Amino acid sequence: MSFQLETKRLILRDFKQEDQTAYQAFTSDKKYQKFYSEEDCLPDKALSLVKQFVSESKLTSRQNYNLAIIDKDTLMIIGVCGLRIQADLQASIGCGLNRHYHAAGLAQEAIECLIDFAFNRLKLHRLYAETISKNKAAIKLCQSVGMREEALFIENRYFKQTWWNTSVLAILKSEWILTQSY
């Protein structure tokens, strides 16, 4: 049985190989690609990533949860969210959403569900997200769930013939618990 989490409006579940077309459709959108390299959004790369997501989901000591975000009303894949466990009870998280679903609070709903899973079921200590500093939507999403900026790296990422700054935002389990008590 595949792994699954649910929210009011979403299902977050393991990818299936047949999800490759839907995954490739939203990652190939030019607006989605603004903060990703075009190579990461090519059809062959989408196919290999979905294969990787599927194989990682079958590991017995799982370290990566790359999950399809499903709209409960339409049962369509509208995005991807991920949790990548690292040493010392820490993990990186991220979320990408089909642009037609932006501004509806769905990314926040997905990330909150993933954070809750990470802290309450996996018993992790710290989660962080790293993004291009000009990706204001990603930074706003992180801040909306209680993450704070921990670092700003100046011109440390080179792609699209440009040096980019990156921001690291994070939240501790103790901070998450405080946000949930309201």
Image: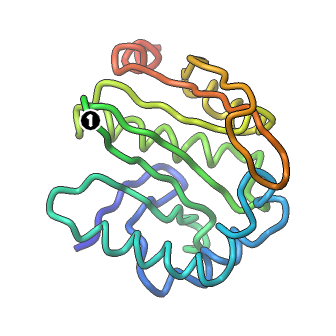
* Image vertical order of residue 20 relative to residue 140, above or below: below
Identified at 62% across, 46% down, the residue is 107
Identified at 23% across, 39% down, the residue is 121
* Image vertical order of residue 113 relative to residue 54, above or below: above
Label 1 sits on a secondary structure element that is: loop
Closer to the camera, 89 or 152?
A: 152
- The spot of residue 78 in percent (x, y) is 63, 65
Of the residues shown, which amino acid type is indicated by label 1?
Ala
Identified at 30% across, 24% down, the residue is 125
Would residue 78 appear left or right of 93 to someone viewing this image?
Answer: right
* Image vertical order of residue 176 relative to residue 135, above or below: above
Q: How is the image coloured?
A: rainbow
Closer to the camera, 30 or 99?
A: 30
Write down the quadrant of residue 157 in the picture.
Answer: top right
Picture quarter with the N terminus: bottom left
- The spot of residue 154 in percent (x, y) is 72, 25
Query: Which residue is situated farthest in the left direction here?
Result: 60
What residue is shown with label 1?
Answer: 87
Q: Residues within 10 Å of mark 1 (few under 14, many from 20)?
A: few
- The spot of residue 113 in percent (x, y) is 44, 42
- The spot of residue 112 in percent (x, y) is 48, 37
Identified at 43% across, 84% down, the residue is 17
Q: How many marks?
A: 1
Closer to the camera, 1 or 92?
A: 92
* Image vertical order of residue 51 relative to residue 99, above or below: below
Write down the quadrant of residue 135 in the picture.
Answer: top right
